[in-house]
Amino acid sequence: MISNYLEVFVLYADCKKTIQGKEYMGTMSVTRSGRQCQHWSSDTPQSVYSGYRMDWKYPNGSFVAAENYCRNPSTYAEYLWCYTTDPHMRWEECDIPKCDSKSAGDCTVSVKKSPWGFLTFFPNGWEF
């Protein structure tokens, strides 16, 4: 028997879950001082360290898909960062807030198909 319910895992991407932020898959592309981040696949104006061009160092499995978003492919950095498009600033830390249980984090959503073919979403814990 196939269930009418589907559990969907949602990860909010506007904050980091850990100090290092290696799991962060958000789209912030500006450093804490407002500089634009450079694409991880580009060498202009900054030359990207070849060790950061390994897909496994990125949470979604691709340095190209990381575009110019703040990431932490480093073994040693304790924060999210990016190379900048400013020729006078090679890299800079990004200011991504840490998630807290009240504002963000992981949640599970239940999805139910109605008799009319519509999908209804219920946050985890709601009775339906």
Image (spheres, rainbow, N blue to C red):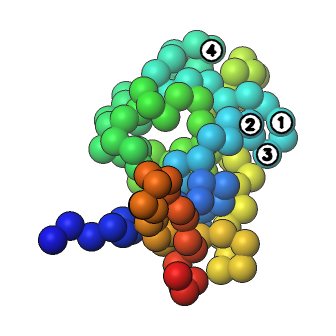
Q: CA distance from mark 4 to mark 3?
A: 19 Å
Q: Earlier in the sequence, mark 4 or mark 3?
A: 3
Task: Answer whether labels 4 and 3 touch (C-beta < 8 Å).
Answer: no
- In front: label 1 or label 4: 1
Q: Residue 123: x and y, percent? A: 57, 73
Element assignment for label 1 = loop
Q: CA distance from mark 1 to mark 4?
A: 17 Å
Task: Answer whether labels 3 and 1 touch (C-beta < 8 Å).
Answer: yes
Amino acid at the residue labelled 1: Gly
Query: Circle 4 sits on which residue?
Result: 45
Q: Earlier in the sequence, mark 1 or mark 4?
A: 1
Q: Quadrant of the N terminus?
A: bottom left
Element assignment for label 4 = loop
Amino acid at the residue labelled 3: Arg
Q: Taking 42 as reference, is 95 above or below it? A: below
Front-lying residue, 117 or 53: 117
Query: Circle 3 sits on which residue?
Result: 32
Residue 5 visible in the shown view = yes
Q: Taking 43 as reference, is 12 above or below it? A: below
Q: Residues within 10 Å of mark 3 (few under 14, many from 20)?
A: few
Query: Circle 2 sits on which residue?
Result: 30
Element assignment for label 3 = loop
Q: Residue 43: x and y, percent? A: 51, 16
Q: Residue 84: x and y, percent? A: 68, 28
Where, by quadrant of the figure, is residue 83 drawn? Answer: top right
